[in-house]
Image: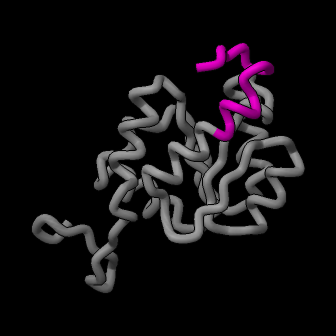
Amino acid sequence: MKGSKIVDSRGKSIKYYPEVPEALEYIQSLGIPMAIASRTGEIDGANQLLQLFKWNKYFQYKEIYPGCKITHFSRFQKATGLPYSSMMFFDDEERNIRDLSKEGVHCVFVRKGVTMKLLKDALQEFKNKSKSELGWQKD
């Protein structure tokens, strides 16, 4: 922390996409458990950012280490007991989307950050696709 800013070791400000806090609050308000997966080698730094942004409270599951997203999601599956088909994944890397889509995870490619419109559209699409499988009733 440098005053009210979060900076890296070179003093460069670290920012998140503007609508991420609202999106996290919205998902939490729906009672949907959240997980975070990152293939970063900077494990301590990633965990520190979650703490500094005060986002740890949103994530029940964390897989932050170098490796494949399939490994991350395999561990989520073991921890939750949920099938891949009941999981949703947002990412900005096409290789991750491609890999997890093959496993049955509902994937959303994020080109320019998570927005509330993107989130709500993705949730509606997932709900429409999965309502019978998950026992959701039609609105």
Residue at position x 75%, y 61% from top? Answer: 96
Above or below for 111 versus 125:
below
Whole-percent x and y of residue 124?
60, 37
Residue at position x 47%, y 51% from top? Answer: 117
Above or below for 105 versus 45:
above
Instruction: Give the main secondary structure, helix, strand or loop, of the magenta stretch.
Output: helix
Magenta residues, start to end? 125-139
Residue at position x 61%, y 45% from top? Answer: 122
Whole-percent x and y of residue 33?
53, 29
Residue at position x 65%, y 48% from top? Answer: 89
Q: Nearer the viewer, residue 116 or 14?
A: 116
Q: Nearer the viewer, residue 116 or 21?
A: 116
The residue furthest front is 139
Q: Is residue 101 covered in magenta?
A: no
Q: Is residue 127 covered in magenta?
A: yes
Quarter of the rendering containing residue 15:
bottom left
Q: Nearer the viewer, residue 6 or 24?
A: 24
